[in-house]
Image: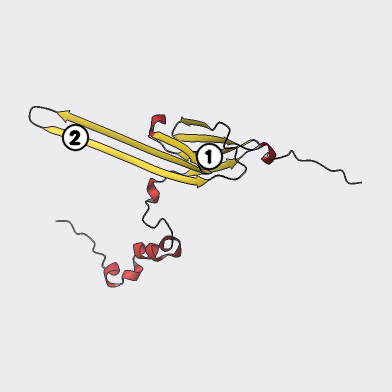
Amino acid sequence: MSLIKFNNKNRLFPWNNPSLKDFLSTDAFFNDDFLAEDGLMPAMNVKEHENDFEIEFAAPGFSKEDFEVSIEDNVLHVVGEKKQEHEDKDNDYMRREFNYTAFKRSMTLPQTADLEAEVKAGYKKGILNLRIGKLETAKIAPKKVIEVM
């Protein structure tokens, strides 16, 4: 017989429970996405370059066919959906497994994004990479050095 340590501190004093503290924290409690699972959201990087914007999503395990990328009303929508099914049949048994993973992220694009130009998208080594061009008027002018006399 093995002994199992019993911790009843959280039963007697529930305010010491870390889960309760996380629930009542201002960041989580008043968040609009209160019921959303943050673990299902891929990490995202946004970089501004001289001629375009680069947006990267970390989505390992997907294939390029699993993504739907669209722009509507100056909002970028990225949806990833992956379904896997596996079935084994034998004389005496049948085993069926399935897995379903999905996410959806949306972000408002800056007014300087050129929505009429082609958006380049690629998926390599678990990273979905999007490049959205800038309007000509919004491109960063090169640094001008002024000589002080």
- Answer left or right for 4 relative to 52: left
Mark 1 secondary-structure assignment: strand
Q: Is residue 140 or residue 6 the one in the foreground?
A: 140
The tally of labels here is: 2
Residue 115 sits in quarter: top right
Q: Position of residue 16 (x, y in %)?
A: 35, 68
Q: Is residue 74 or residue 93 the one in the foreground?
A: 74
Residue type, mark 2 in image: Arg
Mark 2 secondary-structure assignment: strand
Label of residue 55 in the image: 1
Residue 131 sits in quarter: top right
- Answer left or right for 106 relative to 96: right
For image coordinates 62% across by 42% down, the residue present is 112
- Answer left or right for 71 relative to 136: left
CA separation in Å, label 1 and label 2:
37 Å
Quadrant position of the N terminus in the picture: bottom left
For image coordinates 39% across by 38% down, the residue present is 80
Q: Position of residue 135 (x, y in %)?
A: 64, 38
- Answer left or right for 55 relative to 100: right
For image coordinates 58% across by 34% down, the residue present is 116
Q: What residue is pinned by disc 2?
A: 96
